[in-house]
Image (cartoon, rainbow, N blue to C red):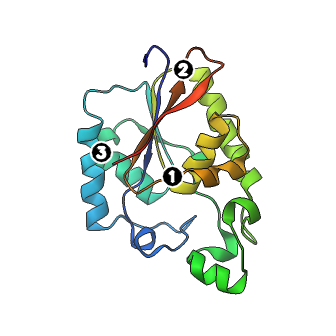
Amino acid sequence: MSNAFPQIHLVRHGETAWSLSGQHTGRTDMPLTPAGEAAARGVAERLKGLSFSAVWSSPSQRAYDTSVLAGFGATSVKMDDLQEWDYGAYEGLTTKQILAERPGWNVFHDGSPQGEVAADVGTRADRIIERLRKANADILIFSSAHFLRVLAARWLGLQPEDGALFVLDTASISVLGYEHDFGEPVVRRWNLK
């Protein structure tokens, strides 16, 4: 597969106490755990030798600190559109806790009361994609799982709800790009540890 086209590298932030416990972490500004910090430093080695025209980060502490520990703090620009899903009333709850009150709930299909629905997150992802396509360059993005999953779905022309089809581990790296031309956006690599 050729790398003649721009590639967008996506990095999910390192582990936090809430990502470890499975609590929904949207706008709560959680720090990385020591293991999360170590994993973020490991991202630097995995991206060694690559250069990027720009580095963008969610303004969250966990995403921005991951960019810093990965060696990109000097160039990392915070963008509000890269924030994680706003979970509203479900902030800090686990899926199990939510399902006990609302059987069959799925964030991608049902959203969060007093928070965002998939279409809201998709709108933010579309604005990021517009900037990526306009830049036409290799760009590195640090953000959170659910937002990056929606971003990947929208990159492929899928509905925001289709982000449910993708899974991301903490400190994972994924790559979006193109196949034969700019009309063929693809996922080149996904959830690499």
Q: Residue 96's x, y, as percent?
A: 58, 80
Compared to residue 54, the image places residue 93 above or below, namely: below
Helix, strand or loop at mark 2: loop
**In the foreground, 74 or 131:** 131
Helix, strand or loop at mark 1: loop
The answer to the question of whether label 1 and label 2 lie on touching residues, with beta carbons closer than 8 A, is no
Q: Could you say which quadrant of the image residue 112 lies in?
A: bottom right
Residue located beneath label 2 in the image: 179
Which residue is at a point 56% across and 29% down the rendered structure image? Answer: 186
What type is the residue that disc 2 sits on?
Glu
Residue farthest to the bottom? Answer: 100
Q: Residue 79's x, y, as percent?
A: 55, 44
Compared to residue 81, the image places residue 22 above or below, namely: below
114 sits left or right of 62 in the view? right
2 sits left or right of 73 in the view? right
Helix, strand or loop at mark 3: helix
Q: CA distance from mark 1 to mark 2?
A: 31 Å
Compared to residue 145, the image places residue 183 above or below, namely: above
What type is the residue that disc 3 sits on?
Val
Residue 43 circle label: 3
The answer to the question of whether label 3 and label 1 lie on touching residues, with beta carbons closer than 8 A, is no
Q: Is residue 80 visible?
A: no
Residue 120 circle label: none
Q: Is residue 113 visible?
A: yes
Which residue is at a point 37% across and 63% down the rendered structure image? Answer: 15
Count neighbours of disc 3 (C-alpha within 10 A) and say few if under 14, some if 14 to 19, many if 20 or more. Answer: many
Q: Residue 24's x, y, as percent?
A: 55, 70
Q: Could you say which quadrant of the image residue 155 lies in?
A: top right
What type is the residue that disc 1 sits on?
Pro
Q: Quadrant of the N terminus?
A: top left
Q: CA distance from mark 2 to mark 3?
A: 25 Å
Residue 59 circle label: 1
